[in-house]
Amino acid sequence: MYSDDDIITSVNTDDDIITANNSTVYDGNVVSSDDDIVITDSSQTNIQYIETTQINMDNSQTVTVDVKNDNSVVNNIYFESTKDSGKAKVVIEDLKDDTGLVEKPSGDVYKSFNIWIDSDNVNNIENAAVDFKVEKTWLKANGIDESSIVLNMYDNGKWVKVPITITGQDSTYVYFTAKVSEYSTFAITSKTITVNNTITSTSSDNDTEEKSGITRSEIIHILEMILAYLKGN
């Protein structure tokens, strides 16, 4: 995973090597099809899957990137281009469980992923969104309802929750969509449940009060008998 200061300035896919900011992020087998590049073997990095797509950015046009790898947690992304920028690179990375996050978001983490657009075009987009999915087996194993799923975006050194909407489901997945302010690092988690520890009175407390009340009554009754006896004498 990249730090806050890391922005992709170039994406090079020559000779089965992918570089970002002139540093190699993958060196292995690359499967290329037209303008799309899909990597399924990423044992040398913290990236589980990576998919690079070349797109055309035309002013006021909606750009949709469909993820070809069915194993990716991301289904597609889409945004509007605010400038005629020509060709651009979009990189979607599914991260491994041991991503080495400096600080994980709260809740149970399902998956995390990166979405990058090369820096020449990163500021030329608006109305960005991402569609993703969560396995029902994970929800069931962790006792989590789909309404408790949260999408967190890493922004300026902290995790920010992004509003999401459930769009559907099938026998395997629950599908979600989220509108985002930008593309960055994301983590899918469950909501954190806060337990309210409230101390309540128990029946033993009531029993003690009742016992104390009976004892006082008996004492008063005895005192009254003593006073009556003294007056009689």
Image (cartoon, helix red, strand yellow):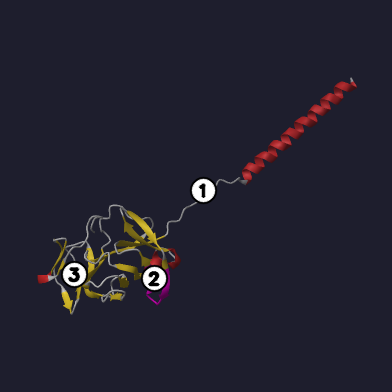
Task: Give above or below for 193 relative to 146.
Answer: above
The picture places residue 110, in percent across and down from the top left corner, at: 34, 63
Which sits in the foreground, 80 or 94?
Answer: 80
Q: Earlier in the sequence, mark 2 or mark 1?
A: 2
The residue singled out by tag 2 in the image is: 176
Task: Give the amino acid at mark 2.
Answer: Phe
Q: Mark 3 Cα within 10 Å, few/some/many (few <14, many 20+)?
A: some
- Looking at the image, the residue that sits furthest to the top is 233
Task: Tell me the CA gap for discs 2 and 1.
Answer: 33 Å
Kindly report which numbered mark, 2 or 1, lies closer to the viewer in this rendering: 2
How packed is label 1: few (under 14 Cα within 10 Å), some, or many (20 or more)?
Answer: few
Q: Residue furthest left?
A: 15
Mark 2 and mark 3: Cα distance apart in space? 27 Å
> Where is residue 188 drawn, in percent x and y?
35, 63
For label 3, the SS is loop
* In the image: residue 107, left or right of residue 87: right
Q: Position of residue 174 (x, y in %)?
A: 39, 72
